[in-house]
Image: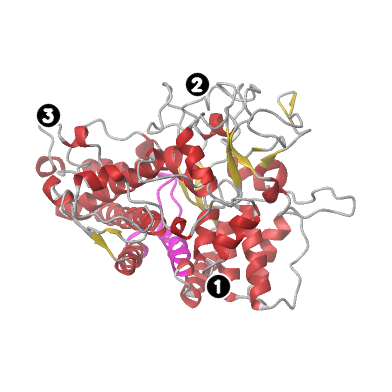
């Protein structure tokens, strides 16, 4: 069941909640048209819950309107697809690395993250001051805000490097003057926030209308990811093992259940973007998921609105699947991940090629049938969630952090679910790392992980080498970081630009 508290964001003016460095100028210049302000709103437990729910909602726009376009399509996993170079040209710029600081997807990513940061800052500052409130809800709300602020900064620092850092609500004049902070300071804040979240959040799973909120184990899992990105493997292993040893999580026996609209927030889920079928026309920033329509094969009518065929898996990715003696893919994850020629769905068969996909490959993970109108009524409001942190990732973090030998049991658990044999023993540290990277690539395709994995590899040339080998020859060293959006720099002269842009 969807969490109505999280998805049904309170119907009041968030004018004060959204003032931050990355909002559109015309929006920032609007005067509040009612009497709700930060001074008179935070009065009750209901207000606290509504404000905390608002911290989650930027995830919907972030994952609809920017994350897959950047983290998937820029990587060696996918090409843009669609109806040619002029169809969503801004995504084509990301795919062929001709982007600049005016790219709207780069701006959307930045905007949505800072929208989440400002809302989290308000909860952290205001909720403790509410006089009459259940202390459990008070602590939980503050913990959720710490977690989400950490997550938004984690998304920012990996993409842009040094970014503006603020841990209290800021005013419009302050937003026009704030400078970028070092990525080291940003990471330190992320770790501190997640440490706070671990202490404040419950150690149990949520039930009823609270399903979809983050708990203490989600914070530990995210902290494990942060430590792995920082190459602090001992600390990453400690946090990952804590989640594993909690006994609260397990792999779905069927890999595809992670993406089934009827089985969301299941035993493997630690954190996912909550979407619902909300109706309405196309918008990245609504409560519905648009990936179903964007990723489905183009003009094949498998989903509502026919399918647009974007985010097309590369041949290089498909070649990574392990095969049997007859050269047939034996990995059980393939049918739920990649749509290939000959696959059947609702009585229709995928052709050998189609517009935008010369090899007939499409992303399968987010399919919702055109017949399932209760889950997707118009193609732009699909109820399907997007997983951000799954138990499979916790296992692979543990495997990578612990290394060959001790870490093999955890990668083998993931491989067993995929119907694959145990990993080869006796691998060198470098060979084992490559094996984990390959497992992550296959396990998390189209879940917006690959680009960040390429960036964090201990070999500083790894990303460039991999991308060039995969045929993305336009990649340059400057692309280790994305440009600070020009719209933000036009409003704030103190924002410097990353090299090369």
- The location of residue 385, given as percent across then percent down, is 50, 40
Instruction: Give the numbered dot on residue 267.
Output: none
Figure colour scheme: secondary structure
Circle 3: is it few (<14), some (14-19), or many (20+) Cα within 10 Å? few
Instruction: Give the numbered dot on residue 401.
Output: 1
Task: State if disc 1 and disc 3 touch (CB < 8 Å).
Answer: no
Circle 1: is it few (<14), some (14-19), or many (20+) Cα within 10 Å? many
Task: State if disc 1 and disc 2 touch (CB < 8 Å).
Answer: no
183 sits to left or right of 212: left
478 sits to left or right of 196: right
Precedes in sequence: disc 2 or disc 3:
3
Examine the residues drawn in magenta and state their main secondary structure: helix
Q: Which stretch did the figure color magenta?
A: 198-227
Precedes in sequence: disc 2 or disc 1:
2
352 sits to left or right of 126: right
Q: Residue furthest right?
A: 326
Secondary element at tag 1: helix
Between 110 and 465, the one lying in front of the other is 465
Q: Quadrant of residue 102?
A: top left
27 sits to left or right of 459: left
Please give the residue where the numbered disc 3 appears in the rendered image: 34
- The location of residue 192, given as percent across then percent down, is 31, 67
Circle 2: is it few (<14), some (14-19), or many (20+) Cα within 10 Å? many
Question: Is residue 54 rendered magenta in the image?
Answer: no
Instruction: Give the numbered dot on residue 378.
Output: 2
Q: How many marks on residues?
A: 3
Q: Which residue is drawn at the image coordinates 14% and 51% (left, top)?
A: 174
């Amino acid at each position: 069941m969807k969490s109505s508290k999280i998805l049904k964001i309170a119907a009041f003016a968030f004018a004060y909640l959204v003032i931050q460095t990355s909002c559109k100028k015309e929006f920032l210049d609007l005067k509040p048209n009612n009497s709700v302000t930060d001074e008179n709103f935070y009065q009750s437990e209901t207000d606290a819950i509504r404000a905390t729910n608002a911290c989650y909602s930027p995830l919907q726009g972030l994952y609809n309107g920017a994350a897959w376009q950047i983290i998937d399509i820029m990587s060696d996993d996918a090409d843009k697809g669609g109806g040619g170079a002029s169809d969503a040209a801004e995504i084509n710029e990301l795919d062929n690395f001709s982007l600049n600081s005016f790219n709207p997807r780069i701006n959307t990513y930045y905007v949505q993250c800072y929208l989440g940061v400002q809302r989290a800052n308000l909860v952290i500052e205001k909720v403790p001051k509410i006089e009459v409130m259940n202390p459990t809800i008070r602590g939980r709300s503050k913990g959720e805000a710490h977690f989400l602020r950490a997550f938004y900064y984690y998304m920012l620092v990996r993409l842009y490097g040094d970014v503006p850092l603020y841990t209290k609500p800021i005013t419009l004049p302050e937003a026009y003057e704030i400078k970028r902070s070092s990525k080291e300071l940003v990471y330190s804040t992320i770790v501190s926030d997640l440490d706070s979240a671990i202490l404040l959040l419950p150690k149990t799973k949520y039930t009823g209308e609270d399903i979809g909120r983050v708990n203490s184990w989600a914070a530990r899992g995210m902290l494990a990811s942060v430590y792995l990105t920082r190459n602090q493997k001992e600390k990453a292993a400690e946090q990952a093992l804590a989640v594993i040893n909690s006994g609260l999580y397990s792999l779905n026996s069927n890999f595809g259940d992670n993406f089934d609209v009827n089985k969301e927030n299941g035993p493997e889920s630690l954190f996912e973007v909550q979407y619902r079928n909300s109706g309405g026309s196309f918008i990245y920033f609504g409560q519905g998921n648009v990936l179903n329509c964007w990723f489905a094969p183009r003009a094949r009518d498998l989903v509502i609105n026919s399918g647009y065929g974007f985010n097309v898996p590369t041949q290089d990715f498909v070649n990574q699947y392990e095969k049997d003696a007859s050269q047939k893919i034996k990995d059980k994850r393939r049918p739920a991940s990649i749509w290939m020629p000959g696959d059947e769905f609702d009585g229709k068969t995928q052709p050998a090629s189609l517009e935008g996909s010369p090899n007939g490959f499409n992303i399968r993970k987010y399919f919702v049938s055109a017949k399932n109108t209760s889950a997707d009524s118009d193609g732009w409001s699909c109820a399907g969630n997007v997983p951000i942190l799954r138990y499979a990732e916790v296992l692979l973090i543990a495997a990578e952090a612990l290394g060959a030998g001790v870490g093999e049991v955890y990668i083998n658990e993931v491989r067993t679910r995929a119907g694959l044999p145990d990993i080869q023993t006796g691998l060198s540290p470098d060979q084992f790392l490559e094996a984990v990277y390959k497992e992550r690539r296959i396990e998390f395709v189209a879940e917006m992980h690959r680009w960040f994995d390429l960036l964090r590899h201990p070999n500083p040339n790894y990303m460039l080498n991999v991308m060039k080998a995969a045929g993305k020859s336009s990649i340059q060293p400057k692309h280790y970081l994305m440009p600070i959006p020009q719209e933000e720099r036009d409003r704030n002269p103190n924002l410097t630009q990353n090299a090369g842009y």
